């Protein structure tokens, strides 16, 4: 029987949470959180993260804190609570602290209505001093992304969008429950470009498969020479760098 790599079975923190998940326990409460906020240097620029834990459908590979919704009501209610938390955090910091980075992740932040994007953005800027050169990044789902959403992000001051692209192969997409056509991805990139928002395509591929994968990210029109790299910055996130070829083959079959 083939043994699973220790890297896959190790209890490691996820990069998407900070402090990382192993640091949270029953003793982490509002008082402790307030104490942490109190240790922040008074004049140091802050980085703010807003989590939107909702998606239209769940991707089977995803381990993020999210849930699929069929109605917008829970999303709207969550935004109401998030607005309250923004005010509470600002109050705990005693004033409008400078902010140099903002990131909205999920889930799917682009599941938000354009109105709620404006509400959250207005609250952030009312409670914090967002610097003129602040980087404002948002994770987007190309599926259903449209002109109105791109313009709402532009109006909010978004400077960069992160586009998830797990694989262009329809068979792989069906296997991971992430059906996303090349046309949808390319269209989202074009809308972002028209709005003046930079974009990056992030695809997690085992390093052993990256050479073959490079030939599968072309998003130009049929017969065209334009590739994903010409549309946006393509960033590979290597996974399982310590696995052998046999282990990678076992994972992928």
Image (cartoon, rainbow, N blue to C red):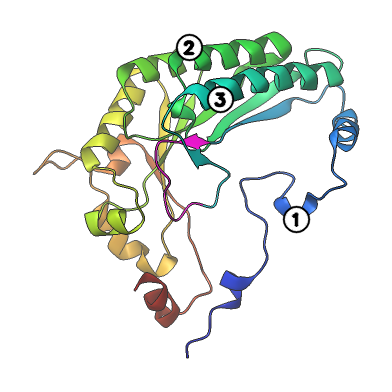
User: Is-magenta flag for residue 57?
Assistant: yes
Vertical placement of 186 versus 20: above or below? above
Of the residues tagged 1 and 3, which is closer to the observer? 1
> Left or right: where does residue 151 sit relative to residue 9?
left
Residue at which label 1 appears: 22
Q: Where does the image place residue 190, in percent across and percent down from the top left?
A: 28, 27
How packed mark 1 is, by other alpha carbons closer than 10 Å (few <14, some 14-19, many 20 or more), is few
> Left or right: where does residue 123 sit relative to residue 243?
right
Q: Where does the image place residue 147, in percent across and percent down from the top left?
A: 31, 18
Please name the predominant secondary structure of the magenta segment in the image. Answer: loop
Q: Where does the image place residue 165, in percent across and percent down from the top left?
A: 36, 46
Of the residues tagged 3 and 2, which is closer to the observer? 2
At mark 1, the secondary structure is helix
Q: Where does the image place residue 46, in percent across and percent down from the top left?
A: 73, 27
- Mark closest to the chain's N terminus, 3 or 2: 2
* Residue 93 showing in the rendered view: no
Q: State the CA–CA distance, disc 1 to disc 2.
A: 35 Å
> Left or right: where does residue 65 sit relative to residue 48?
left
Residue at which label 2 appears: 115
**What segment carries the magenta color?**
54-62
The answer to whether mark 3 and mark 2 are in CB contact below 8 A is no
- Mark closest to the chain's N terminus, 1 or 3: 1
How packed mark 2 is, by other alpha carbons closer than 10 Å (few <14, some 14-19, many 20 or more), is few
Residue appearing at x 62%, y 50% in the figure = 15
Vertical placement of 2 versus 110: above or below? below
Q: State the CA–CA distance, disc 3 to disc 2.
A: 18 Å
Residue at which label 3 appears: 136
At mark 3, the secondary structure is strand
């Amino acid at each position: 029987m083939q043994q699973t790599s220790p890297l896959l079975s190790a209890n490691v923190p996820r990069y998407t949470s900070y402090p990382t998940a192993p640091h949270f326990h029953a003793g982490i409460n509002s008082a402790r959180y307030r104490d942490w906020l109190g240790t922040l240097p008074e004049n140091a620029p802050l980085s703010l993260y807003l989590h939107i834990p909702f998606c239209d459908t769940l991707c089977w590979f995803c381990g993020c804190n999210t849930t699929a919704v069929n109605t917008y009501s829970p999303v709207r209610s969550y935004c109401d609570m998030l607005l309250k938390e923004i005010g509470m955090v600002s109050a705990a910091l005693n004033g409008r602290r400078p902010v140099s980075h903002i990131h909205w992740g999920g889930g799917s932040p682009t599941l938000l209505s354009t109105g709620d994007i404006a509400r959250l953005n207005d609250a952030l800027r009312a409670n914090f001093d967002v610097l003129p050169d602040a980087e404002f990044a948002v994770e987007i789902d190309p599926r259903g992304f449209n002109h109105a959403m791109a313009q709402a992000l532009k109006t909010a001051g978004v400077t960069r969008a992160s586009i998830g692209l797990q694989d262009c192969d329809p068979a792989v997409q069906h296997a991971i429950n992430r059906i996303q056509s090349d046309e949808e991805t390319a269209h989202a990139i074009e809308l972002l470009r028209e709005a003046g928002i930079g974009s990056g395509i992030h695809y997690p591929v085992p390093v052993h498969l990256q050479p073959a994968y490079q030939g599968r990210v072309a998003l130009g029109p049929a017969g065209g020479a334009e590739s994903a790299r010409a549309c946006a910055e393509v960033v590979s996130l290597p996974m399982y760098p310590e696995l052998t070829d046999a282990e990678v083959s076992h994972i992928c079959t």
